[in-house]
């Protein structure tokens, strides 16, 4: 905006360009040389980068804060402040401002305005003429004609005679007093140009007053503005010499921060305004202050401790505000104080600071509780004479040394007001030291008044002389209006009968019950506060003084009273330590706090009359103290943590009637001391881990009615003493087997004496023998009796006499009963009318219950009648086998098998089923072979119950296999599960009969220890898995092993020597792993071995051996097995030996393979690609048919005799002689030999050579001195050598290249002469491109051309065979193509280049010799590949300042040699992998995230406890959580060395732990976290923080809570920890910015948001932009704990424009809801919002998601119904915290991106887009339970593994409707019991029948309509639904011949989802046009 040199006039508008959307960008406003007046508005601070010209105007002031806008005027303001905006009055320059270091503002006394551009003449009489002019301005501006007194004004030529004007001897105006003079209007700011003015009194006038230009009044010391209606004192901070300021009875709402800059102030009067918020700690800056009055305002919060630093203060008047918190102890430092008034009752001006009504029962007009906590002693205040603290909530007693320091104790009255607090105890006798005292103590809880006080006759204005103690306080049981006697008429009156006044000083009496209630209410309040009451799930009425405590949630009172009888708050989210004071509730009988996170102590429990205590599931570890509650009758302690120790305190609870001990580890035993609990009626201890016989002392518990000890491991017989429990009704000893016990044994007792028994449970034990004939008979029983004896070993029959027990139900299935069931029993009611089958199935029949219970559950006959000889069988021979196979068929998708012959034939024998083989002569299944048969699902473990099963072969099926119960398959010897997707074989060790195990081509990761217990194993095939770790030395246990195949895995480490125990081994195939070390002699001593495969190249028994070879990569050189090659001369049967691609060295032994017996047999040996040297031994000619692969070694001789071995190499030697074995020196090919006629050995090209036999490449030969010179000449010319900074000697004839600048030479290995080894020309002004010819320098080791403007190519770098260091920092390198061939590189520097966001190339990871890798600041993008693990020699990795994304690869943890890892300033997210523990040599770790607008790393702070050398950690500016672990760096070797830890600006909580004291010289930065405490011991470690702790104590570690500095800790005298200003004080230590400053910044951001987003036109903008209202109360804004903003909720509020990126800089912003607003939302900077979890932008017109990937903390993202097009960006996958992702109703296309990294995802809503492709199974999203992809064009079958990782108990929602899905709805979904599934309008052709039986699906529709409740069948349709539901006629499946597929919602031909969608869209458009037409009409 350029408007220079016009005639514009008037004030500058505050809202200039307020609608601009570019206020954050560079803005230029040119208004110079006009006639603008007044002040530059402070509101212009919204412009962040303003270039401003206001020179040559009549500007008189600069708005507050503008001089701190450091980016203004191109950053000059940051250097020169206000002068860079406008030169001050009295100065000038030609620009009107300082534009740099040389254009300073020059002195010019005549320059009257800011920004003068020229200097004129000075007036003749500046003092008089100027003052008169100013006074006249005041007269006319303030309505002088109407003044009460205007004598002399404008009429007398001498202003010193004007009314109210005082002058000095020179005639200059020194004072202006116009108070109460009827002034009206605005006082011109020119008044401050009265240069001699010292005092200005304008009080009691109706004026407007501005402090602009007050800095001109350099002599002003006194300013009176009371009763003027003043609303703001902004700008007063420039009054640098002001001493007295009065502004009482005005309309002030805030105290501006710049007031605290007026450090000259001595007296400040601001009473009776409306000042709110917190009192700033910056008050301490007013160090000269003597009197401060702030009475009768609305101040809140804690009184700042900084006030205690006002060492000159005499009067502090804070009466009648709303302060909270406690009295700051710093108040005791105010030794000069005389009057301290912080009471909340009234006070008026003209009275003492405490007011006239001190000590009177007027209560308080203020809300809240006031100041709490203890009363300070104020013992160091020698001058105190008045102390007012009434109507607060102070607690505790009056300190005995209260006011001890007052010096004048006799001659001057001391006034103390403590009325209406909560003080208690005794008023101390120490107060008697004061001669004259008025002490107001009424309405507290004092119980005693020291006797000596009643003799202080001069107290209470001598009323003690007249009325004795009553003049101080009325005694208990009496009252008075003021709580004391004040005259003869106001005596202390006795309380009426039935009422009481329990304390001294009562204002009134209350009834007796209310006395107790008052105390009990206080106790409950203490409990509420201690247990975090505000967060309880239910806290109805708690702390509501208007509601009876009996109505508080969970509280029950004694009937008719206000006394607590019970506290019932189970599962209510209580948290904390339960205060023991609850035991003082006199009538408390019941406590139920079960299921809360609390700590419960029983100390003091003896005080309560408690009978009922429920503390289930709270984590109790002890019951210590409970022994003192012998009155307890009921005790619940289920599910606690007694850690194997029985809580012996229970023994003392002799009145106990009910005891719940279940689900605890109590040490395995119930002890006999429990026999003392003779009143016990109910004892429950299931799942207690009991491992003992049933205690006999139980029989002594004569009162016992209920005994439950099931689900333990009890053993032995049931003792006869149980018969003594004559009152017992319920006994449960069931299931003592499932937890590994032997169960109860012995005979079944008769239980004849237990006449009240109603329930007896003994199932799942091993009771044996016959059922006693008098079982259950004592007296005749007529009540219902239930007896469960199932699954024992009972024999015989059932006594017919039991029929007399008419209401008996007895269950006996699964026993060994053979005798017929008496007919009388078969007619009993529990048989349900099914006769004897209703009791037990007869022999030869069975069912799953062993009895018939319904028509559908009849006893079924067995095929083999002899297989079930007992009554009540649960299974039987062949029928049980058929049932097992039936389940096998059903659960593995049998109908879809490729071959299922006879499986569905009910009459067929199982032996005729496809894939089933039975044992000869018996119908018993022996083999199950269904390989490659399309099995899908989980193999039921019941197959292990097939008694003769020997073989399972299920290879190449998509199945899940579980080994539970495999121990039952006693005969199983073969298990073939290759290619089935197996991920684990945990539990396989129980298959002890296994001999043959085939598990190849699966996903196995680890071999469990129990695998090595399979001692019968002979053949093991584990090839092509992902098995990791080392080969266990337990391998030696498999002594029957003959063939071990484990190639192509990830096994590391050495071959264990224990392989030597495998004496039967024939094949040892471990090829294609990552093993190392030497080949152990124990392996070469196994004489049975025929095949050894340890090569690193591919192939099962290596069929690819002998094929083309590739040059080893850097990572492969030196890898694999090392050391010399064994002779293998003790292996007579060896036929194949594969050792290729390792690093074996030395010569081939002379007796190599000499032990092989049959040398005429075909033998195959691979030794290629090792480091073997010398000659191949001639003894090998003994073999007739040898294939010997030796290429790519360093062999120099091949015996001539080999050339005549015609049968060698498959007969190739007969044709190609020795070339068939190895190419001779000087030749090469890709085989290193002539493999056939088409692959001859080729000669090396000129200047190249092949030194050894068997070469696969040629390398440059030594070219000599001349060729090196020529190469350097080319280099010089290509890089602009003529312009180099230093080209000394280059190209000079007669000068050796070794003397050229930057060239280093050394003698070559042969000593032939000097050769170039280094080119080092950094920062030498090279330009151009370095030619690849330098790679032909044969001995070149180092190239350094860093800091030059050169390009660099890596083509041909493989020729530089010894090149080990490249320094290319700050060059023009932009690609690393070809770098992978520099196999010898150990050092690579390519920092500060531009790789244009490309990923780090994969070939870089092939440089296996790299030790130092520098990639910092080079614009690399993408993720850091897991291939980094290949660089296992890496010691330094610098990758700072790139744009790497995603999570840190776990494989970094495999770099065991790494010492420095620098990954700071990238975009990494997620947790630091646990695998980093493998970096055991790491010394320095840097992963800061200061600059990348990213939340950075998350998760807990790692313990690094495996790091022995890590002394430097920098993880600043991330999002790490939790506390610092106790074992942090615990294994650091040298804890006395200097250790530097950077954890600044994370989310670390808790205490800085004492364990850190293990480090002697720690320098730790944990500022900017949420740490609340430092262990005191750390503050004594004087060597910490570079010695700062010695100087500054704890402050050197972290600034205390409520203080701050720019570092968060103190490191020098210059930067102390300063108290924070304002009401918003952080509770955390180490603040680097105060929350008040943060909130101030947030206000500026919100104001900017308001201005750029059309705030004026919002539907609701209540309180926005109001300086009188805290931003937390602006509409749509909420704050965390009332402090900083945590949510912006402005959905549907007509917000427009582009929300500024600064909104993401709100530190605690968690929720941002801007849905249904027409905004242009950008994600730029969203990474700064490190706590943002919910972002709702639906219906906003959003069109791009660019940058959203940085929002990795968001859990809830709603971007529905917008204008998004194209594919979903890949960066969505970086949002690893997402739980709910909604993107329906857009126009997104393409395949869905991967969601595998979103491990927290719960809901995925993708409907109504145009997504295509297959549906993922989301198996890795284990929390996902809701998916909507409806209305897209997705295709393919519905995955059978859909949601396979999700818990089966979850309620699932799936909407796949209106797509192109094909095939059958998979039966695997049946694992979910609860599902709502929509599938209409797809191409589905069937439903798996299993799904039609799940009644609960689709809200019960499946239970009602079977399959139709999922989809209508083909040939039918259901309008709108596509299925049948309870919705009337339209929801039924109706006939339609055109409905080809299942789930049609209309009757017609459906071609695809696309046509349906297009039709729908046209319909919507047509409808819209019609509506529009109607609207227009």
Image (cartoon, helix red, strand yellow):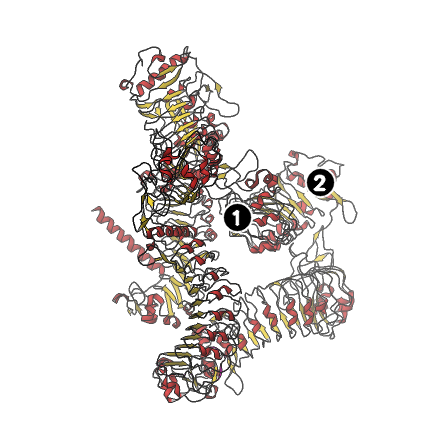
Question: Quick one: quadrant of the N terminus?
Answer: top left
Q: Report if residue 1598 lies within the magenta region.
A: no
Does residue 129 show up?
yes
Q: Report if residue 764 lies within the magenta region.
A: yes
Indicate the quadrant where residue 1272 lies.
top right
The label on residue 1303 is: 2
Q: How many marks?
A: 2
The overriding secondary structure of the stretch rendered in magenta is loop
Q: Nearer the viewer, residue 1524 or 654?
A: 654
**Label 1 residue SS:** strand
Indicate the quadrant where residue 1949 lies.
bottom left
Percent x, y of residue 880: 46, 81
- In the image, residue 115 sits, relative to residue 1931, either above or below, namely above
Percent x, y of residue 20: 38, 35
- In the image, residue 1876 sits, relative to residue 1251, either above or below, namely below
Percent x, y of residue 1685: 41, 43
Whether tag 1 and tag 2 are in contact, CB under 8 A, the answer is no
- In the image, residue 180 sits, relative to residue 1257, either above or below, namely above
Residue count near mark 1 (Cα–Cα under 10 Å), binned few <14, some 14–19, many ≥20: some
Q: Nearer the viewer, residue 1952 or 190?
A: 190
Q: Nearer the viewer, residue 403 or 1236?
A: 403
- In the image, residue 1225 sits, relative to residue 779, either above or below, namely above
649 to the left or right of 1875 = right
814 to the left or right of 442 = right
Residue that numbered label 1 is attached to: 1551
Q: Residue at x 68, y 45 (%)?
A: 1342
The stretch of residues the image draws in magenta is 763-782
In front of the other: label 1 or label 2?
Answer: 1
């Amino acid at each position: 905006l350029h408007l220079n040199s016009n005639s514009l006039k008037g004030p500058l508008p505050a809202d200039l360009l307020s609608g601009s959307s570019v206020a954050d960008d560079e803005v230029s406003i040119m208004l110079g040389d006009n006639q603008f007046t007044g002040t530059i508005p402070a509101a212009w601070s919204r412009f962040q980068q303003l270039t401003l010209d206001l020179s040559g105007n009549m500007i008189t002031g600069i708005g507050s804060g503008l001089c701190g806008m450091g980016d203004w005027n191109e950053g000059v303001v940051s250097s020169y402040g206000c002068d860079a905006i406008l030169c001050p009055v009295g100065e000038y320059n030609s620009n009107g401002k300082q534009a740099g270091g040389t254009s300073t503002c020059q002195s010019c006394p005549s320059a009257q305005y800011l920004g003068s551009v020229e200097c004129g003449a000075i007036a003749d009489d500046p003092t008089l003429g100027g003052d008169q002019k100013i006074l006249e301005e005041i007269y006319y501006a303030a309505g002088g004609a109407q003044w009460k007194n205007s004598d002399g004004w404008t009429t007398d030529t001498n202003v010193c005679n004007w009314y109210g004007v005082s002058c000095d001897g020179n005639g200059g105006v020194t004072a202006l007093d116009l108070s109460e003079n009827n002034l009206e209007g605005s006082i011109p700011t020119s008044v401050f140009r009265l240069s001699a003015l010292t005092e200005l009194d304008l009080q009691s006038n109706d004026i407007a007053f501005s402090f602009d230009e007050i800095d001109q009044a350099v002599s002003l010391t006194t300013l009176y503005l009371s009763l003027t209606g003043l609303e703001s004192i902004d700008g007063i901070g420039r009054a640098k010499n002001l001493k007295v300021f009065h502004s009482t009875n005005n309309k002030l709402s805030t105290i501006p921060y710049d007031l605290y800059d007026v450090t000259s102030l001595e007296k400040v009067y601001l009473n009776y305004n409306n000042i709110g918020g917190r009192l700033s700690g910056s008050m301490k800056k007013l160090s000269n202050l003597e009197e401060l009055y702030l009475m009768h305002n609305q101040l809140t919060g804690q009184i700042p401790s900084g006030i205690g630093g006002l060492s000159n203060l005499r009067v502090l008047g804070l009466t009648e505000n709303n302060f909270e918190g406690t009295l700051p102890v710093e108040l005791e430092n105010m030794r000069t104080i005389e009057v301290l008034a912080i009471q909340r009752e009234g006070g008026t001006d003209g009275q003492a600071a405490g007011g006239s009504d001190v000590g009177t029962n007027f209560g308080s007009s203020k809300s809240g509780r006031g100041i709490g906590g203890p009363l300070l002693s104020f013992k160091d205040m020698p001058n105190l004479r008045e102390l007012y603290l009434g109507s607060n909530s102070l607690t505790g007693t009056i300190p005995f040394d209260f006011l001890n320091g007052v010096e004048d104790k006799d001659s001057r009255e001391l006034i103390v007001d403590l009325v209406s607090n909560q003080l208690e105890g005794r008023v101390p006798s120490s107060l008697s030291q004061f001669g004259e005292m008025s002490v107001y103590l009424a309405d507290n809880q004092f119980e005693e008044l020291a006797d000596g006080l009643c003799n202080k006759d001069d107290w209470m204005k001598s009323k003690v002389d007249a009325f004795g103690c009553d003049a101080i306080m009325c005694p208990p049981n009496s009252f008075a209006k003021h709580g004391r006697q004040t005259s003869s008429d106001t005596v202390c009156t006795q309380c009426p009968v039935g009422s009481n006044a329990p304390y001294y000083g009562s204002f009134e009496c209350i009834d007796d019950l209310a006395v107790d209630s008052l105390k009990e209410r206080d106790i409950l309040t203490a409990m509420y506060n201690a247990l975090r009451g505000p967060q309880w799930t239910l806290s109805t009425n708690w702390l509501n003084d208007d509601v009876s405590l009996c109505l508080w949630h969970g509280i029950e009172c004694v009937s008719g009273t206000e006394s607590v009888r019970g506290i019932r708050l189970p599962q209510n989210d209580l948290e904390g330590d339960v205060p023991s004071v609850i035991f003082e509730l006199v009538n408390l009988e019941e406590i139920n706090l079960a299921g809360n996170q609390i700590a419960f102590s029983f100390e003091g429990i003896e005080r309560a009359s408690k009978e009922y205590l429920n503390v289930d599931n709270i984590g109790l570890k002890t019951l210590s103290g409970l022994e003192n509650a012998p009155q307890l009758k009921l005790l619940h302690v289920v599910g606690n943590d007694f850690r194997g120790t029985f809580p012996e305190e229970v023994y003392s609870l002799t009145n106990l009637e009910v005891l719940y001990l279940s689900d605890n580890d109590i040490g395995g035993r119930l002890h006999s001391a429990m026999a003392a609990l003779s009143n016990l009626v109910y004892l429950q201890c299931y799942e207690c881990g009991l491992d003992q016989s049933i205690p006999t002392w139980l029989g002594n518990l004569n009162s016992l009615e209920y005994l439950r000890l099931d689900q333990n491991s009890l053993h032995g017989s049931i003792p006869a003493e149980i018969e003594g429990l004559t009152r017992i009704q319920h006994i449960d000893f069931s299931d003592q087997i499932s937890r590994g016990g032997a169960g109860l044994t012995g005979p079944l007792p008769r239980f004849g004496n237990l006449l009240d028994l109603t329930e007896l449970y003994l199932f799942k034990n091993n009771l044996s023998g016959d059922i006693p004939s008098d079982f259950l008979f004592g007296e005749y029983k007529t009540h219902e009796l239930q007896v469960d004896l199932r699954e024992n070993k009972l024999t015989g029959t059932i006594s017919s006499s039991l029929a007399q027990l008419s209401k008996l139900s007895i269950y006996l299935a699964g026993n060994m009963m053979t005798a017929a069931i008496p007919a009388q029993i078969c007619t009993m009611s529990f048989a349900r009318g099914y006769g004897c089958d209703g009791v037990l199935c007869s022999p030869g029949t069975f069912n799953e219950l062993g009895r018939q219970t319904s028509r559908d559950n009849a006893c079924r006959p067995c095929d083999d009648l002899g297989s079930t000889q007992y009554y009540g069988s649960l299974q039987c021979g062949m029928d049980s086998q058929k049932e097992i196979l039936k389940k096998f068929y059903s659960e593995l998708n049998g109908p879809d098998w490729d071959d299922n012959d006879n499986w569905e034939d009910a009459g067929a024998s199982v032996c005729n089923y496809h894939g089933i083989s039975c044992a000869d002569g018996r119908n018993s299944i022996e083999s199950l072979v269904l390989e490659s048969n399309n099995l899908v699902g989980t193999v039921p473990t019941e197959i292990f119950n097939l008694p003769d099963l020997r073989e399972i072969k299920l290879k190449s099926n998509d199945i899940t296999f579980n080994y539970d119960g495999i121990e039952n398959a006693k005969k199983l010897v073969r298990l073939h599960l290759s290619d089935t997707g197996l991920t684990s074989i945990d539990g396989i060790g129980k298959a002890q009969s296994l001999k043959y195990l085939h598990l190849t081509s699966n996903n196995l990761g680890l071999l469990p220890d129990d695998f090595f217990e399979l001692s019968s194993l002979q053949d093991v095939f584990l090839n092509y898995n992902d098995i990791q770790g080392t080969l266990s030395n337990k391998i030696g246990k498999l002594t029957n092993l003959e063939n071990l195949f484990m190639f192509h895995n990830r096994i590391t480490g050495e071959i264990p020597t224990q392989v030597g125990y495998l004496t039967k081994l024939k094949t040892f195939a471990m090829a294609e792993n990552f093993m190392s070390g030497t080949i152990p002699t124990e392996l070469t001593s196994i004489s049975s071995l025929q095949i050894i495969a340890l090569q690193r190249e591919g192939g099962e028994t290596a069929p690819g051996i002998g094929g083309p070879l590739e040059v080893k990569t850097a990572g492969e050189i030196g890898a694999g097995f090392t050391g010399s090659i064994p002779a293998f001369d003790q292996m007579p049967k060896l036929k194949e030996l594969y050792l290729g691609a390792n690093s074996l060295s030395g010569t081939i032994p002379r007796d190599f393979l000499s032990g092989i017996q049959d040398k005429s047999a075909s033998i195959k040996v691979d030794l290629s690609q090792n480091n073997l040297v010398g000659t191949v031994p001639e003894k090998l000619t003994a073999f007739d048919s040898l294939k010997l692969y030796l290429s790519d070694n360093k062999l120099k001789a091949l015996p001539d005799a080999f050339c005549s071995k015609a049968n060698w190499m498959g007969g190739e030697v007969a044709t190609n002689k020795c070339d068939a074995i190895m190419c001779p020196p000087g030749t090469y090919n890709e085989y290193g030999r002539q493999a056939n006629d088409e692959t001859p050995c080729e000669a090396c090209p000129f200047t190249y050579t092949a030194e050894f036999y068997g070469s696969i490449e040629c390398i440059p030969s030594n070219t000599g001195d001349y060729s090196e010179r020529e190469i350097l000449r080319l280099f010089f010319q290509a890089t602009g050598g003529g312009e180099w900074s230093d080209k000394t000697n280059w190209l000079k004839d007669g000068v050796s290249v070794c003397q050229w600048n930057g060239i280093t030479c050394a003698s070559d290995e042969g000593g032939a002469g000097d050769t170039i080894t280094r080119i080092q020309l950094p920062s030498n002004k090279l330009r151009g491109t370095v030619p690849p010819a330098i790679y032909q320098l044969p001995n070149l080791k180092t190239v350094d051309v860093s800091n030059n403007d050169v390009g660099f190519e890596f083509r041909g770098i493989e020729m530089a065979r010894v090149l080990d260091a490249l320094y290319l920092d700050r060059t023009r390198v932009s690609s690393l193509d070809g770098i992978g061939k520099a196999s010898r590189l150990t050092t690579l520097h390519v920092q500060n280049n531009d790789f244009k966001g490309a990923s780090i190339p994969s070939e870089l990871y092939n440089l296996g010799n790299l030790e130092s890798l520098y990639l910092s600041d080079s614009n690399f993008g993408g993720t850091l590949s897991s291939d980094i693990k290949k660089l296992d020699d890496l010691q330094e990795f610098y990758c700072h300042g790139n744009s790497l994304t995603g999570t840190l690869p776990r494989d970094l943890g495999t770099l065991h040699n790494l010492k420095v890892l620098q990954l700071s300033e990238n975009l990494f997210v997620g947790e630091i992998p646990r695998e980093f523990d493998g970096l055991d040599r790491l010394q320095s770790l840097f992963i800061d995230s200061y600059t990348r607008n990213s939340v950075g790393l998350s998760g807990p702070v790692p313990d690094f406890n495996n790091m022995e050398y890590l002394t430097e950690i920098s993880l600043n500016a991330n999002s790490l959580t939790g506390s610092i672990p106790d074992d942090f760096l615990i294994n650091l070797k040298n804890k006395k060395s200097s250790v530097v830890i950077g954890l600044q600006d994370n989310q670390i909580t808790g205490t800085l732990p004492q364990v850190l004291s293990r480090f002697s010289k720690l320098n730790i930065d944990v500022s900017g976290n949420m740490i609340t405490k430092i262990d005191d011991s750390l503050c004594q470690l004087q060597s910490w923080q570079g010695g700062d702790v010695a100087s500054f104590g704890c402050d050197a570690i972290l600034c205390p809570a409520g203080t701050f500095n720019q570092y968060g800790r103190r490191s020098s005298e210059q930067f102390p920890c300063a108290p924070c200003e304002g009401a918003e004080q952080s509770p955390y230590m180490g603040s680097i910015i105060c929350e008040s400053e943060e909130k101030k910044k947030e206000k500026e951001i919100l104001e900017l948001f308001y201005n750029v987003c059309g705030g004026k036109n919002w539907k609701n903008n209540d309180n926005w932009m109001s300086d009188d209202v805290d931003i937390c109360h602006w509409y749509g804004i909420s704050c965390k704990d009332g402090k900083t903003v945590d949510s912006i909720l402005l959905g549907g509020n007509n917000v427009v424009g582009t929300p500024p990126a600064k909104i993401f800089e709100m530190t605690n912003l968690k929720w941002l809801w801007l849905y249904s607003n027409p905004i242009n939302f950008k994600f730029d900077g969203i990474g700064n919002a490190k706590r943002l979890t919910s972002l709702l932008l639906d219906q906003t017109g959003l069109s791009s998601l660019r940058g959203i990937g940085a929002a990795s903390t968001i859990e809830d993202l709603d971007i529905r119904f917008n204008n998004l097009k194209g594919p979903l960006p890949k960066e969505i996958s970086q949002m690893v915290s997402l739980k709910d992702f909604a993107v329906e109703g857009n126009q997104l296309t393409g395949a869905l991106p991967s969601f595998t990294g979103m491990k927290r995802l719960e809901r995925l809503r993708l409907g109504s887009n145009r997504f295509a492709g297959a549906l993922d199974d989301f198996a890795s999203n284990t929390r996902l339970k809701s998916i909507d992809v409806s209305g897209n064009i997705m295709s393919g079958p519905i995955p059978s593994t859909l949601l396979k990782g999700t818990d089966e108990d979850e309620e699932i929602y799936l909407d796949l409707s209106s797509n192109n899905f094909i095939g059958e709805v998979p039966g695997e979904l049946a694992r979910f019991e609860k599902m709502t599934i929509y599938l209409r309008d797809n191409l589905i052709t069937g439903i798996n029948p299993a799904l039609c039986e799940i009644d609960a699906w689709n809200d019960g529709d499946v239970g009602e309509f079977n399959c139709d409740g999922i989809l209508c069948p083909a040939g039918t349709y259901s309008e709108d639904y596509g299925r049948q539901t309870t919705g009337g006629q339209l929801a039924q499946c109706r006939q339609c011949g055109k409905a080809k597929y299942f789930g049609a919602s209309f009757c017609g031909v459906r071609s695809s989802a696309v046509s349906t969608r297009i039709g729908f869209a046209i319909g919507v458009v047509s409808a819209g046009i019609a509506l529009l037409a109607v609207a227009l009409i």
